[in-house]
Image (cartoon, rainbow, N blue to C red):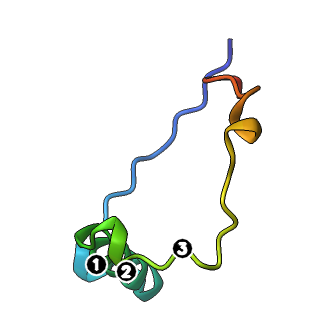
Amino acid sequence: MDMKKHAVVRLKRDDMPLHIILHTNELLALAEKSDKEIDYSDIPETTDEQWGNEVRGKF
């Protein structure tokens, strides 16, 4: 088996690209909100029937 070696890239927060910093900040701000404070109006609601045939770990 031919295994390729991959280099590990480590970035300090000051060295990260701006889009990653902005995305991280957005996720942190969202994590601080309660579920009632989050606007889900642009996401369609899922029903129990839609989840009825789902299998954990299929992919």
Q: Which mark is residue 26?
A: 2
Question: Residue 31, percent across and down?
Answer: 29, 67
Q: Is residue 39 above or below residue 7?
A: below
Tag 3–tag 2 contact (CB < 8 Å): no
Q: Which residue is mark 1?
A: 29
Q: Amino acid at mark 3?
A: Tyr
Q: Earlier in the sequence, mark 3 or mark 2?
A: 2
Residue at 59% from the left image edge and 78% from the top image edge = 41
Real-space CA distance between mark 3 and mark 2, rounded to the nearest whole angstrom: 16 Å
Real-space CA distance between mark 1 and mark 3, rounded to the nearest whole angstrom: 16 Å
Residue at 47% from the left image edge and 84% from the top image edge = 19
- Pointer 2 local density, CA inside 10 Å: few below 14, some 14–19, many at least 20: few
Helix, strand or loop under label 3: loop
* Residue, far top: 1
Q: Quadrant of the C terminus?
A: top right
Q: Earlier in the sequence, mark 1 or mark 3?
A: 1
Residue at 67% from the left image edge and 19% from the top image edge = 2
In front of the other: 26 or 45: 45
Find residue 58 and report its image quarter. top right
Helix, strand or loop under label 2: helix
- Pointer 3 local density, CA inside 10 Å: few below 14, some 14–19, many at least 20: few
Q: Amino acid at mark 2?
A: Glu
Nearer mark to the viewer, of 3 and 2? 3
* Residue, far front: 48
Q: Which mark is residue 40?
A: 3
Q: Quadrant of the N terminus?
A: top right
Q: Is 58 left, or right, of 7 in this rendering?
A: right
Tag 1–tag 2 contact (CB < 8 Å): yes
